[in-house]
Amino acid sequence: MSRIENGDKIFPALFDLQINIVSLLVEVGVIGDLEHKFEAIKGTVRSLYESHEVFSNRMDAFRHQFSVILRYRAIWDKFMGLIIMRFLPDKYDAYMKAKSKKKDFITITSKVHIDTLFKPLIDAMMEFDDEFRTTEAHFTGRIRKWTFTSLGIHASPSLRLIHPYIGIHLRNMLSLLKAAFN
């Protein structure tokens, strides 16, 4: 890394990104396990609130789903910061102070014409933000409703939180990072 400008900052940032990706994938696995357990026990009760086991399962599902939403978006911020640090290091400090890193990333990368390279990933992030992060982080949220009023993840939009598209986007992100540092 020493041949790359800011290599002493980039290496820890890459390591942080990897740790968060692994943590996200663990959370997704836990959600899958919780939903599998819920499917096995939900027929034994008429209400999510009449059994401690069922209610605990739903609380854990809510906690892990919320964690996936915030961690997934944090991964995007880390990714965008790495790209700015790698290709436009003189813009990094201003980027880190930006109120909206997503908007600033789009603005900065469009000025140097590398925005098209990231457009599919940015579109995916914007779709995710619109459906999940914005409502959970800034409003009353929907995950709580989906988790505590539906009869499982298959009956709710939160199924998208464990859908393979997260893995596909993460693979694309990592491929772009690999190309950026080769």
Image: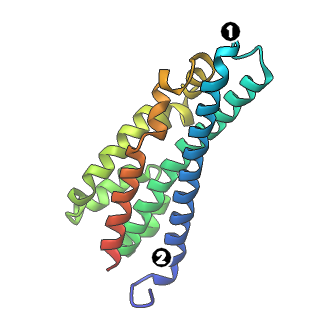
Q: Is residue 95 above or below residue 51?
A: below
Q: Position of residue 131 (x, y in %)?
A: 42, 32
Q: Position of residue 44 (x, y in %)?
A: 70, 15
Q: Relative to 168, is 145 on the left or the right?
A: right
Foreground pick, 157 / 2: 157
Please report the residue visible at 47 percent of the width from the left and 34 percent of the height from the top: 132
Q: CA distance from mark 2 to mark 1?
A: 53 Å
Residue 10 is labelled as 2
Is 51 left, or right, of 69 in this rendering?
A: right
Disc 2 element: helix
Nearest the viewer among 4 and 28 is 28
Residue 73 tag number: none
Name which residue lies at 53% across and 27% down: 153
Above or below for 173 versus 41: below
Horizontal side of 149 relative to 59 (left or right) equals: left
Q: Are marks 2 and 1 in contact (CB under 8 Å)?
A: no
Q: Can residue 130 be seen?
A: yes
Residue closest to the eye, 45 or 1: 45
Q: Nearer the viewer, mark 2 or mark 1?
A: 1
* Residue at x-position 49% and y-position 55%: 75
Q: Which residue is mark 1?
A: 46
